[in-house]
Image (cartoon, rainbow, N blue to C red):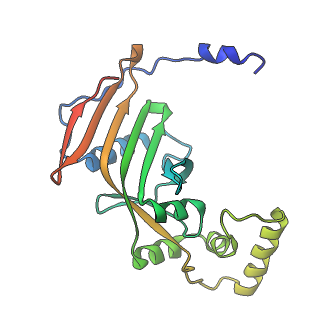
């Protein structure tokens, strides 16, 4: 891009899809399921992708894209290395924010909540469901740590493949899942003329309530 000032001219209308209070479920988890089923056939590239935001011990925010791998017990689940940067931040401050964006339907979902690890059973079950090479990659990767070059990783993976063959592998203790237990969930539907629909759910005395926000 030769002239960054042209960024201000990049815009689009979002369409006629709407989000109305009529027929909204009492639970935002159910509303998320409805939206997810609707976007699944439309968003061909990683509909499970979500931005996970955490903070470090100094309060600096950090974000990265992870993949939603479960929606159980009213919680959003993803899996990672427990010695990664995100995991160290979550051990210090066990709160996080998720953001889903589905551009084909001009929809966004923002989730804020508390975080805890999944059970060993859940982590074992998901790890066992992964392709063998993905399991082995989790074993050899010291996630977020400096390495000399890519060849170091590839050589380590090839050695492990040669050692294990097609034998099942046990989940490493430093790898597993996290559950984001939501306290707030906002649904955003892009509309024409920037008059977007925003419905905000939050918990009050253990019960979900919702109302509309100005765009």
Nearest the eye: 206 or 78: 206
Q: Is residue 19 left or right of residue 209?
A: right
Q: What residue is rendered at 65% in x and 66% in y? A: 143
Above or below, 15 against 27 in this view is above
Nearest the eye: 21 or 8: 8
Residue 6, picture quadrant: top right
Residue 9, picture quadrant: top right
Where residue 115 appears, as percent x and y from the top left, is: 39, 61
Q: Is residue 152 left or right of residue 40?
A: right
Where residue 157 appears, as percent x and y from the top left, is: 75, 74
Residue 99, picture quadrant: top left
Q: What residue is rendered at 37% in x and 20% in y? A: 16
Query: Is any atom of residue 34 visible in this view?
Result: no
Nearest the eye: 40 or 2: 2
Q: What residue is rendered at 42% in x and 40% in y? A: 39
Where residue 130 appears, as percent x and y from the top left, is: 55, 70
Query: Is any atom of residue 145 visible in this view?
Result: yes
Q: What residue is rendered at 73% in x and 79% in y? A: 161
Q: Give the quadrant of the C terminus.
A: top left
Q: Is residue 14 left or right of residue 32?
A: right
Figure disc tally: 0
Above or below, 37 against 105 in this view is below
Q: Give the quadrant of the N terminus.
A: top right
Q: Residue furthest front?
A: 58
Where residue 98 appears, as percent x and y from the top left, is: 44, 48
């Amino acid at each position: 891009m030769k002239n960054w000032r042209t960024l201000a001219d990049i815009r689009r209308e979002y369409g006629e899809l709407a989000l109305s209070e009529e027929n909204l479920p009492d639970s935002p988890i159910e509303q998320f399921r409805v939206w997810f089923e609707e976007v699944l056939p439309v968003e061909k590239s990683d509909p499970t992708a979500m931005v996970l935001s955490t903070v470090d011990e100094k309060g600096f925010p950090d974000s990265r894209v992870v993949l939603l791998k479960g929606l159980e017990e009213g919680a959003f689940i993803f899996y990672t290395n427990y010695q990664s940067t995100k995991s160290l931040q979550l051990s210090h401050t066990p709160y996080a924010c998720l953001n889903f964006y589905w551009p084909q339907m001009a929809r966004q979902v923002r989730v804020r909540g508390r975080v805890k690890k999944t059970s060993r059973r859940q982590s074992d079950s998901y790890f066992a469901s992964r392709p063998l090479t993905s399991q082995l990659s989790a074993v050899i990767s010291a996630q977020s740590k400096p390495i000399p070059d890519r060849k170091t990783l590839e050589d380590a993976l090839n050695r492990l493949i040669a050692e294990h063959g097609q034998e099942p592998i046990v989940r490493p203790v430093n790898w597993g899942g996290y559950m984001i237990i939501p306290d707030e969930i906002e649904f955003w539907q892009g509309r024409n003329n920037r008059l977007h629909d925003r419905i905000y759910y939050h918990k009050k005395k253990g019960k979900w309530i919702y109302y509309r926000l100005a765009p």
